[in-house]
Image (cartoon, rainbow, N blue to C red):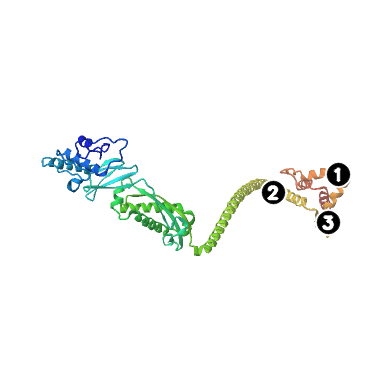
Amino acid sequence: MRLMSKIFSLNDPGWGRSNNSGSEPPRRPGKGDGPPDLEEVWRDFNNRLGAFFGRKVKRGGNNGGGNGGGGGFMPSPKGLPKAIAIGVVVVLGLWLASGFLIVQEGQVAVVTKFGKYESTLGPGLQWRLPYPIENHQMVNISQLRTFEVGFRGNARNKILPESLMLTNDENIVDIQFVVQYRLMTNGAPDYLFKTTHPDQSVRQVAETAMREVVGKKPMDVILYSGRTEVAADVQKLTQSILDRYQTGIQISTVAIQNVQPPEQVQAAFDDAVKAGQDRERQINEGNAYASKVLPEAQGQAARLVQEAEGYRAKIEGDAKGDAARFNNIEAEYAKAPDILRERLYLATMQEIFEKSSKVMVDTQSGNNLLYLPLDKIMQQVARVNPDKTASTAAETTAPAPAPAPKASKSAATRSGSMGLPAPLRDSLSLNRYAR
């Protein structure tokens, strides 16, 4: 091989510059020489090839014609096997060298043997059996592929057969979304051999999944609150179908670009949206009012309950006190009934007279009716003697002393009348004199 490279070196400047007879070696080009003639180059090549196979060849002149005009060689029978062997080695080497391949970063080479999948080669310099035993296909697994459903390029360029979908509440919505996907690390063989048109399959599967998810949800959820949820459900369902088909594709993103009702009903839908917003606003106002009123009502109810509890405790205490006082009075009444009866009568009358401004006194001995204007009498007494009026009022408000157990009826009457106002006490004295 070194000898061949030396003989047939393309860097040799003597190509096409040998003499016509061939007795001298090729000469170096001079300053005045032009470029070599193509016929001379071909003649030099034949001469060198003939010398390599061990046989001298005839060198023809520039005007040579026929078989010798273009130069040629006829190898000897002894050098023919050697030439064949060298040719076979060269061809075999070139054939084996054709199995080398360079796999770029982010790509894999899928190798097939006689059309059947054999292996997957990673990035770098790789080798496989040459064609036709093995062949390979380059697949880019790092490329993020994108396609659009419902529009192309611009949201205004709509594709209505793809974008119009039916919701659960029998409404039609116009949905435009974008799907991004890439191949799995070990999904290149499935991408090439398991599906006829994998990219078109992804588009059809994504559209099918979107229609299924939209068909299970009401229109309001899809338009407003459920966009993110719908996109996540579509991505999950699409990936599930692609895995079932063994496409070797992984869905990266499903992004909803635009959702709206059809243009034909856009105005009516806007009115419905405004009505819904008014409804939500009124509901919010009602909830705010309830949040304000309910605590106040609960506080008032708690206050009423506390007041009722206090009133009950007061009534129960008063009732128990009255019962205890009645029991004490009953015990005293059993000891001296007449005295206690007179005292109770006087105390009751005193309580009544304190609240009365006029008193009518009827006598048993005659038909005369005594009229006592207590309010006027008190006013006159106050104008005449203010100090005496004040002492009289103190005596009126002071509690009466307890009666003696064995006092006589007249004594009880006098002691009971002492707690009365002066005009009433005088009238009672006149009544006793009259009797």
Q: Nearer the viewer, residue 363 or 142?
A: 142
For the C terminus, give its image quadrant.
bottom right
Q: Identify the secondary structure beneath mark 3.
A: strand
Residue 306 place in picture, x, y as percent: 61, 48
| Residue wearing tag 2 | 337
Q: Residues within 10 Å of mark 3 (few under 14, many from 20)?
A: few
Does 208 sit above or below residue 182?
A: below
- Amino acid type for the residue under numbered disc 1: Pro
In front: mark 1 or mark 2? Answer: 1
Q: Position of residue 419 (x, y in %)?
A: 78, 46
Q: Earlier in the sequence, mark 1 or mark 2?
A: 2
- Tell me: residue 284, above or below residue 53: below
Instruction: Nearest to the eye among marks 1 and 3: give it.
Output: 1
Q: Disc 1 or 3, which lies upstream in sequence? A: 3
Q: Within the image, what quadrant is residue 385 found in?
A: top right
- Specify the amino acid type for callout 2: Pro
The residue type indicated by label 3 comes to Leu
Which tag, 3 or 2, sits closer to the chain's start? 2
- Whole-number angstrom distance, CA of label 3 to CA of label 2: 31 Å
Q: CA distance from mark 1 to mark 2?
A: 40 Å
Relative depth, front residue between 379 and 74: 74
Q: Is residue 187 above or below residue 278?
A: above
The answer to whether 296 appears left or right of 202 in the picture is right
Task: Check disc 1 and report the residue beneath it.
Answer: 386
**Residue projecting furthest to the left:** 78
Name the one closer to the observer, 148 or 351: 148
Badge 1 crowding class, 10 Å Cα cut-off, few under 14, some 14 to 19, many 20 or more, is: few
Res 179 seen here: yes
> Dot 3 corresponds to which residue?
370
SS at circle 2: helix
